[in-house]
Amino acid sequence: MRHFLTLKDYRKEEILEILQLAKKIKKETKNKIFTKYLDMQTLGMIFEKSSTRTRVSFETGIYQLGGVGLFLSSSDLQLGRGEPLKDTSRVISSMVDMLMIRTFKQSGLEEFTKYSKVPVINGLTNEYHPMQLLADYLTIQEANLDINLKVAYIGDGNNLAHSWLMLASKLGFELAISTPKGYEVNQDILNDAQKFAKISGAKIYIGNDPKIAVKNASVVTTDTWISMGQEDEKEQRIKDFDGFIVDKKMMSLAQEKAIFLHCLPAYRNYEVSEEIFESSSSLVFQEAENRLHAQKAVMVWLDQKRV
Ligand code: CP
Ligand code: NVA
């Protein structure tokens, strides 16, 4: 049985295989063909943090695949009153066919998974957001930018930055990450990425100057400066991230036809200017829709890998 906790656990061939499946499923969906790949199956969706895209795409996705999704918010579950993750996992996984969880620590997700009888999907942790990256890469492929790809990630060294590190180092493309001083990516995750990059041929640049990172990029991406759970740091972060906005000036350093991606929700005039967000180079809503297609593919793929 396989789980989907981080791209670190996935080989290049497997990532590309899931993306291929996502394209097939997207085409079917667009043609209103809803193959019941997961007929009568139940997906438990546990949320310990807020969500718009992840919730709607998983719930719609499982329904379109012939199954049903259960939205389980920690504020309603006994989990929110202190029932341990490992007990929650044993109980819910005895009743559903697949689980998705959005939680805090990756180690908590790992413990939850250890006790699960069914495949578990990471719907975001403090460390990683792998589902997002599949949708992002699908969008890049659709824009025909996956050859000689250079991605510039400008912003916080957070779960998104870590997931970009995993994707680039597994698939072998160029990734430049620029964060303000003090907001760098996790060193252990970077070490892993550099290890994978040696095999895949990925080029990884890490620094604190966004102008260097964005130079000649074909994809420019960012994320909120204040992730869920960091609300108390808002004032300080806004000061520290000065100069990291993706605006027209920043985009002009990238390739002429560069696209802008953002996992959303976006905070205009903080990490991205209104102008760039609403520009024709911004593919953020195609990217958001691709969450649905990529996640359907992951669910089908995991179902096929059951033993
Ligand atoms: N990008 C993303 O995961 O969005 P939500 O937090 O709305 O699910
Ligand atoms: N880095 C953000 C991503 C939201 C989808 C967070 O963790 O809040």
Image (cartoon, helix red, strand yellow):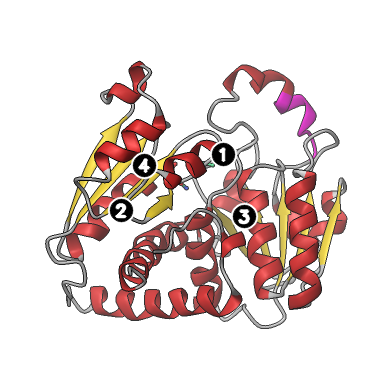
Q: Residues within 10 Å of mark 4 (few under 14, many from 20)?
A: few
Q: Secondary structure at mark 2?
A: helix
| Label whose residue precedes the other's in the sequence (2 or 1) | 2
Residue 228 % position (x, y): 53, 30
Residue 241 is a magenta residue = yes
Identify the disc placed on residue 58: 2
Q: Quadrant of ligand 2?
A: top right
Residue 244 % position (x, y): 76, 42
The amino acid type found where label 1 is placed reads Ser
- Return the residue at label 3: 163
Q: Secondary structure at mark 3?
A: helix
Q: Residues within 10 Å of mark 1 (few under 14, many from 20)?
A: few
The part of the chain drawn in magenta is 237-243
The amino acid type found where label 4 is placed reads Thr
Instruction: Mark 4 and ligand 1: say if the CB distance to the nearest ligand atom is below 8 Å.
Output: yes
- Judge whether 140 appears above or below 44 on screen: below
Q: Residue at x 34, y 61 (%)?
A: 292
Give the number of the mark in front: 4 or 2. 2
Q: Residue at x 23, y 45 (%)?
A: 94
Tell me the distance, in whole angstroms, between the alpha carbons under discs 3 and 4: 20 Å
- Return the residue at label 1: 107
